[in-house]
Image (spheres, rainbow, N blue to C red):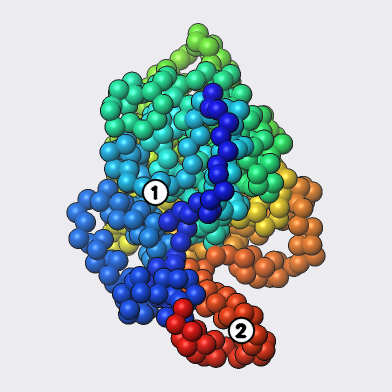
Amino acid sequence: MASTFQRPAMPPRQLSTTSGDYDLANPPEVRKFLGTYGLTPPAVENYEIQAQRCLRLLAMKTTPIEKFQYLVHLRATNVHLFYRLLSENVKELTPLIYTPTVGEACVRWHEIWTQPEGMYLSWHDRGNLRQILDNWPHEVEITVLTDGSRILGLGDLGVNGMGIPVGKLALYTACAGIRPDGTLPLTLDLGTNNKTLREDPLYMGSRMPKVTPEQEREFLDELMAALTDKWPSIVIQFEDFKNPFPALERYQNTYCMFNDDVQGTGAVIVGGFINAVKASGKPAKDHRAIFLGAGSAGVGVAKQIVEFFIKEGLTEDEARRKFWFVDSHGLVTLDRGDKLADHKVYFARDDNNGRQYQSLSRLIDFVQPTILMGLSTIGGAFNKDILQKMAKLNDRPIIFPLSNPSSKSECTFEEAVNNTEGRCLFASGSPFPSMEYGGKLLTPGQGNNMYVFPGIGLGAIISKTTSITQDMIYASAESLSTSLNKQEVADGWLYPDIRRIREVSVVVTRGVIRAAQKNGVDRAVELRGLNDDQLDVYIKERMYDPFTDGEKNLDEAGHLLATASGMPSSAYSNGVNTISNGLNGAHL
């Protein structure tokens, strides 16, 4: 256990990843105020020129991992420019900073690491977690934490999993405008069962096997108390734990926390699923779903779809029996002879008449599903035979291969379209390109969690919720399903254009806040009196905008100079010119 250590009186620790001080968009007066005058080239550049340079540099990189590394460097050295670039090119750059590229980055984290990002808390630090959190120099609104034990579909990567919290929080900022310096990437170094990593001389985590579930629970108890003592209103998002259910069940009613793998994945899929059911022409009661993959993510998705079915008039039992789960041993049944994991029992079948189905193809013949969902991480599992069966059974088969990264996807968009005669209602977990079929341009839906988790986080922050309820999670799904514009609906899309993500996040945030108010878990009770239009304005005013933060620096510089020099307040209110002249004259 780490010994107690008091840091001597020193200046606050600075993190380059939260600084926009060296932005070439800053005019001379702001550079003087920030103390960076003379430390950058003298030109004052507009965003268009800066973006041109960034995009040219990106184009010079030949592999996704090289592009990832460049964007990491850009965020570390010029955070406002990074988020300007990302917000203007979100569709093109998101796959480079998150899935699928972040998967390779995590696998190689111990090889490509160059600078500190976020915090690492080790098993040996227990007893001192609260004190260590004091080393973080900023006021935190939201943290994403992982123990690295199940990174995407790549397995146990230990502290290499830090790429996930870093990338996820970049999307919280880009999509929902949560301040960059209000985010905390957090990785728990609790050992790893990845023997190859443990023995790699470059691995940067503790070289010990993963602690037991009981030890992890003890560690998390201390951590949750420490986080909320340090930052009482913090939102805590769990990510990529091998077994996410114990922590979710233990903390969800006590802390403002959620698990994106279970709840966010479920919500984003429900959002697309609601629109797919509408487009299929069949009422909810006539749908049947086969899930390939019975892990935590699959069960989390299905439980939220159960909620949708209940809202459509089914009983819980009727809704639960709309699902057939397949794991590595075949159809999940109560009588197949093995001990089922706790989370699988809810959906285990008892109507299989003693027959066990190992073959997905045979199970499709038996169930005759309208919906095929994949969360198995088995690339190509939805082969030509499977897809053609679905097309024979349904006019508009719902095909959702949701595994990440794209190499683990159960099928591609092109395979789904070609083998269903272009009739499938498709959404995937990873991005696939549009394609022409039958003279029409078809665009795949991507059930990317970034449609919902930024709005869940921002809604919890703004409403100051004491916990994140299931109603708030479901509200994010319903809100997402309503966020498509008329053209997107007319084109048969299941999800809105990702380039409108900030607009979508406002809609999702509003839905989450309203659900928090209905559940009585909101502490910002003054928001209850706002109508929806007023609430939308309130949300937008609190979203970080990388294009205007430089102007805020200028305003702050002017205000401080006016105060220090005894200028009348009218000089400050007259705008930049008066202050600018004062700063230039001061030669700071």
Secondary structure type for disc 1 = loop
Secondary structure type for disc 2 = helix
Please state the horizontal and vertical placement of residue 311, each as a whole percent of the image: 68, 44
Task: Check residue 565 in the rendering and tell me which mark sits there, or answer none.
Answer: 2
Please state the horizontal and vertical placement of residue 286, each as a whole percent of the image: 57, 39
- Tell me: 180 left or right of 55: right
Q: Is 316 in front, or is 54?
A: 54
Question: How busy is the neighbourhood of tag 1: few (under 14 within 10 Å), some, or many (20 plus)?
Answer: many
Furthest residue in direction top, as rendered: 337
- Which quadrant holds residue 567? bottom right
The residue that appears at 34% across and 24% down in the rendered structure is: 198
- Which quadrant holds residue 257? top right
The residue that appears at 24% across and 67% down in the rendered structure is: 56
Residue 365 shows in this picture: no
Residue type, numbered disc 1 = Tyr
The quadrant in which the N terminus is found is top right
| Residue for badge 1 | 98
The residue that appears at 60% across and 24% down in the rendered structure is: 217
Q: Is residue 67 above or below residue 369?
A: below
